[in-house]
Image: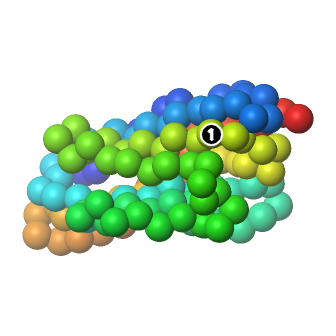
Amino acid sequence: QVQLVESGGGLAQAGGSLRLSCAASGSIFSINAMAWYRQAPGKQRELVALISGGGATRYAESVKGRFTIARDNTKNTLYLQMNSLKPEDTAVYYCNADCVVAGTMSDYWGQGTQVTVSS
């Protein structure tokens, strides 16, 4: 019904930048909150940044001032601009969206995209 497809991951050097994208498709009536999570090896998945349907944003302390979350509602696409990358940002990054489909709101996840930051 709903697919979230991430792109833009890869390898970056410390201090560099990457931009992640997440395109939502399917029988979507509307999308409320969207978010980026990440999971490093041996660690729990954690919230990186969230943007509400109205555009309010929230960030993990560890990425404040370095990452920027944004969305394009006309394209059902979520973005994460990551600057001043650190090796500790290395993780699989997942897109998450609360989508209304056939009158029901459900939580959807992308397949994840690997981000590796070398020192």
* Image x and y of residue 14, in percent: 79, 35
Point out the image quarter for the C terminus.
top right
Say what secondary structure mark 1 lies in. loop
Number of numbered discs: 1
What residue is rendered at 59% in x and 32% in y? Answer: 18
Location of mark 1 (residue): 83
* Image x and y of residue 10, in percent: 66, 29
Rendered position, 31 above or below 68: below
Whether residue 50 sits left or right of residue 30 in the image: it is right
Q: Which quarter of the figure has residue 52?
A: bottom left
Whether residue 18 sits left or right of residue 33 in the image: it is right
What residue is rendered at 49% in x and 44% in y? Answer: 80
What residue is rendered at 31% in x and 42% in y? Answer: 77
* Image x and y of residue 112, in percent: 56, 45
| Residue 66 shows in the view | yes
What residue is rendered at 78% in x and 44% in y? Answer: 86
* Image x and y of residue 4, in percent: 38, 45
Closest to the observer, 64 or 53: 64
What type is the residue that disc 1 sits on? Asn
Whether residue 29 sits left or right of residue 5 in the image: it is left
Closest to the observer, 15 or 5: 15
| Residue 98 shows in the view | no
